[in-house]
Amino acid sequence: MTDRLRRVLAEPETGRFGPEANLIRDTVRRFVADEILPNVDRWEEEGTFPRELYPMAGRIGILGVGYPADVGGTPTGIWGQIATWEEMARCTSGGVAASLGSHHIALPPIVAHGTPDQHRRFVAPVLAGDRIAALAITEPGAGSDVANLTTRAVRDGDDYVIDGTKTFITSGVRADQFTVAVRTGGPGHGGISLLVVEADTDGFSRSGPLPKMGWWPSDTATLYFDQVRVPAANRIGPENAGFRIIMENFQMERLQLAVSGYVTAETAIVEAWRYATDRTVFGRPVAEFQANRHRFVDLVAETAAAKEFTYRAAEAVARGEDRTTEISMAKLLATAAAEHATYAAVQIFGGAGYLRGTVAERLYRDARILAIGGGTTEIMREIVAKRIL
């Protein structure tokens, strides 16, 4: 029965994923099976994973999927990227997937708006796995409200001098470079720029790993900038044009979070069904109770709908269309599906689902961040409301 359930939740043959995307999927799936899944329980308890995982992923091209060949990437359409995101999410550890993939939110602004020198210095080494990149936007007083960030960069000759604090930064402990949102102009969205700051720059410091509800192996940190001097050559795009670049970057991040959402839901459903068919209560399997069977049907339907809607948004992205509304809706639907499915999985497992070390427990605590990261559920609703009401 579990195999049948997997087939229902799997992507049907609709022509979306071509031969190239399927080859990429096979590569990522083998990497996850060989290098992550055998170690993931231990990494969760240790709250970290080996840095060596980055060059391992870089050597076989996983880190570079979707990036241009001239910066060391593997050019592919959106479906190659989605195949990569799906298989990485199936490692069952949101923390490993998030930190290993933090470059996906740090590099796109540099690739799209950076100079050839920036590509050479800040993109190619990351895709090779030799450097770790992180995005630094959120501050103690400004999260989803990007236009109100206060970290300031003042121009001084050929440099900018940065003062401020960033927090909740994924890969913040180990990253070698940060794509940092700073205020170079007046208040509001029109005064924001992006700078690349290297971790060994004088005046830069960071906290140790912040203890979190979930994503345990992800090294999340607070960053401190105290008169950090950065060359103006590290600015990405024109001065005070950073807000538009950040909003552009958010779309792919939100699409990726939607993918993580429905894959988390799929994994939780399969894990719960496996347990429900094995666990006997009052003389029969938990799966045979009508209330549970109907609950699974609802979860499968919700997850399949969220997945299909995400694919629909991705098709529009592949055509080069602006689909901000649809991507925001996809994130809403998929992250809700993840929360519902992981809650149900823990409930089906009962006491066993409350114990650390079960996949159901890990998925439950990891799923909660999906509705917060990349723009909260409330922000997604506000974006959609402004566009359709």
Image (cartoon, grey):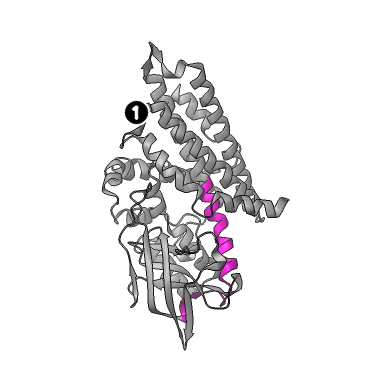
Which residue is at a point 66% across and 51% down the rendered structure image?
A: 384
Q: Give the prevailing secondary structure in the magenta stretch.
A: helix
Place of residue 225 in the rendered image (x, y in percent of width and height, measured from the top left): 39, 73
- Residue type marked 1: Gly
**Residue 245 highlighted magenta (yes or no):** yes
Which residue is at a point 33% across and 50% down the rendered structure image?
A: 217
Q: Is residue 292 left or right of residue 351?
A: right
Residue farthest to the top, as pictured: 283
Place of residue 82 in the rendered image (x, y in percent of width and height, measured from the top left): 52, 47
SS category of the residue bearing label 1? helix
Q: Is residue 35 left or right of residue 21?
A: left
Q: Residue beneath label 1, please? A: 351
Q: In the figure, residue 202 lies in which quadrant?
A: bottom left
Place of residue 134 in the rendered image (x, y in percent of width and height, measured from the top left): 42, 62
Q: Quick one: quadrant of the N terminus?
A: top left
**Residue 174 highlighted magenta (yes or no):** no
Front residue of 340/277: it is: 340
User: Could you tell me how many numbered marks the image carries?
Assistant: 1
Residue 171 visible from this viewpoint? yes
Residue farthest to the bottom, as pictured: 157
Q: Is residue 127 left or right of residue 309?
A: left
Place of residue 168 in the rendered image (x, y in percent of width and height, measured from the top left): 41, 59
Magenta stretch bounds: 232-258
